[in-house]
Amino acid sequence: MLILRYDTDIYDFQGCARRGLGVSDLTRLHAEPVPVADWPRRTRELWWSSRLYATVTDNMQELYLRFIHNVLREHTGLPVSIQKRVCFRVQLPATCAHEPTYHRDSTWGQQPQTLNVWIPYVPVAGTNALWVETAPGRSDHRPIDLDYGEALIFAGGPMSHGAVTNTGDSTRVSGDLRYLPSVAMP
């Protein structure tokens, strides 16, 4: 597992998401109006994620590719292959982003040496962070608290990870991408 700091002026993931969604504060997305006011929170999360896919996919993909080629390459070499599209995640307060809560990407056929690049577009801590076990098979999940401008790189195939119910008052907005590095991460 590796936490990297990056320059948010060069890799402005948050700004790209804000412009695409037409909002000024991603952490307050849960307070923004949606087409149907009484939608359940999980439906609202999916609606916001869909809006990200519809409005910023190409720009975000280009940012992630530059990030992998320019920032990660000093740690893992150039990528051999890269996931075709960024996955956007929105977790509103009082919701759990995914069921089941924890999983290993190897369940869906990801190779063990594939790395996950998880970038929150807002500061995350505690229950609105990503939870990852400290080593494969330990099941000792802990939140990975990150500031905006930090990225988590980890082997999501063998390492269990996921979300818990967001008991805070801040919406988490993040993106993730998987890639196969040319050298193993230390």
Image: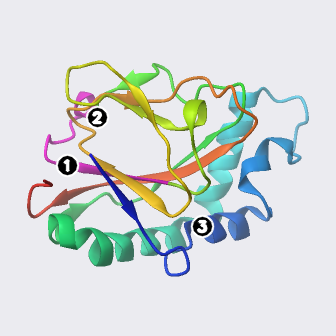
List x then y, in percent, for residue 66: 37, 77
How many callouts does the rendering have?
3
Residue underneath mark 2: 105
- The magenta region covers 105-119
Q: Which mark is residue 114?
A: 1
Let me know if residue 161 is in the magenta part: no
Q: Where is residue 129 in the image (x, y as percent from the top left)?
A: 53, 38
- Find out whether the residues at labels 1 and 2 contact each other: C-beta distance under 8 Å: yes
Pair 3/1: label in front: 1
Of all residues, the one furthest to the left in this rendering is 183
Does 171 appear above or below 22? above
Q: Which mark is residue 60?
A: none
Q: What is the crowding at mark 2: few (fewer than 14 residues within 10 Å), some, or many (at least 20)?
A: many
Task: Answer left or right for 19 relative to 62.
Answer: right
Q: How far apart are marks 1 and 2 (CA)?
A: 9 Å
Residue identified by numbered label 3: 56
* Quadrant in the picture for the N terminus: top left
Residue type at tag 1: Thr
Taking depth in this image into account, of 150 and 60 the one nearest to the observer is: 150
Q: First in sequence, mark 3 or 1: give its number.
A: 3
In the rendered structure, which amino acid carries the disc numbered 3?
Val
Residue at left 65%, top 70%? 15
